[in-house]
């Protein structure tokens, strides 16, 4: 029996282990766009902050954000072979699909990057893509996925690893599950009201399927 008819996944840090490449891209971007890079000294602190708080901490003004985002997507595109799905993700997606769950991915990353990491066979499992969202543009992408799916809000689960993912889900009154292996410190996510925690890929299955 299904608890949810649609599961909307974030990509980077949730399905794909791209953190090392992301850190590399921020070092290059920091030099080019003149902001403080993520380092071993500030990383753990910043993992517990929202996007706006991180931007303030590293001195990245809002007007530079679109250019930095484009740079990051292109940097990743050129090195996308370095990114792999987390262990068990492919099997988890296949089982959800076999149970009749619609699958979606909403991400700031490009659809080209997402499809290359997923591979052709796994791409066929995904019903809806909402890619290329701006840093603060996940809400309209998620809303579009909801409309395309035809699924009511109470039958939707969002799965992600960032504060902004939580904010989008709560704004649209969708259930949210946070993964413990992503970018944000899981302790910060666990203390948020209404957030379900996933310690393993198998926990996503347990949440979605009764």
Image (cartoon, rainbow, N blue to C red):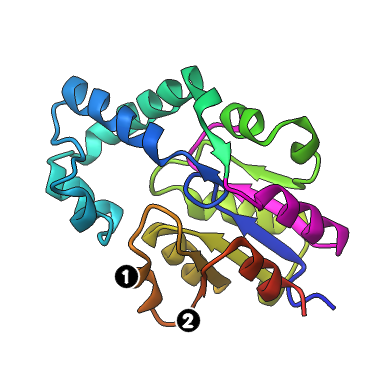
Q: Residue at x 71, y 57 (%)?
A: 147
Q: What are the residue bounds of the magenta stretch?
A: 86-111
Q: Position of residue 191 (x, y in %)?
A: 35, 79
Q: Earlier in the sequence, mark 1 or mark 2?
A: 1
Q: Position of residue 194 (x, y in %)?
A: 47, 81
- Give the CA separation, mark 1 to mark 2: 13 Å
Q: Position of residue 74 (x, y in %)?
A: 44, 21
State which quadrant residue 123 falls in: top right
Query: Which quarter shows the C terminus?
Result: bottom right
Q: Residue at x 13, y 47 (%)?
A: 41
Mark 2 neighbour class, 10 Å CA radius: few under 14, some 14 to 19, many 20 or more? few
* Secondary structure found at label 1: helix
State which quadrant residue 101 falls in: bottom right
Q: Which residue is mark 2?
A: 194
Is 104 included in the stretch rendered in magenta? yes
Query: Which residue is outermost to the top?
Result: 78
Q: Residue at x 52, y 25 (%)?
A: 80
Q: Is residue 85 above or below residue 91?
A: above
Q: Which residue is mark 1?
A: 188
Q: Is residue 169 above or below residue 62?
A: below
Marking on residue 179: none
Q: Say left or right for 102 vs 76.
A: right
Numbered marks: total: 2
């Amino acid at each position: 029996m299904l608890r949810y008819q649609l599961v909307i996944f974030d990509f980077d840090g949730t399905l794909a282990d791209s953190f090392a490449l992301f850190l590399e891209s921020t070092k290059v971007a920091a030099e080019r766009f003149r902001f403080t890079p993520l380092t071993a000294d500030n990383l753990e602190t910043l993992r517990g902050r929202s996007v706006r708080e991180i931007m303030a901490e590293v001195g990245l003004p809002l007007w530079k954000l679109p250019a930095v985002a484009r740079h990051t997507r292109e940097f990743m595109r050129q090195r996308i072979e370095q990114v792999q799905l987390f262990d068990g993700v492919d099997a988890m997606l296949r089982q959800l699909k076999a149970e009749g769950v619609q699958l979606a991915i909403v991400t700031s990353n490009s659809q080209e990057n997402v499809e290359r990491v997923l591979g052709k066979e796994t791409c066929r499992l995904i019903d809806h893509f909402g890619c290329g969202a701006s840093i603060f543009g996940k809400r309209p992408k998620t809303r579009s996925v909801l409309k395309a799916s035809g699924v009511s809000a109470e039958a939707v689960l969002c799965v992600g690893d960032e504060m902004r993912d939580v904010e989008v889900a709560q704004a649209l009154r969708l259930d949210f599950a946070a993964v413990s292996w992503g970018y944000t410190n899981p302790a910060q996510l666990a203390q948020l009201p209404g957030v379900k925690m996933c310690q393993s890929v198998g926990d996503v299955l347990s949440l979605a399927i009764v």
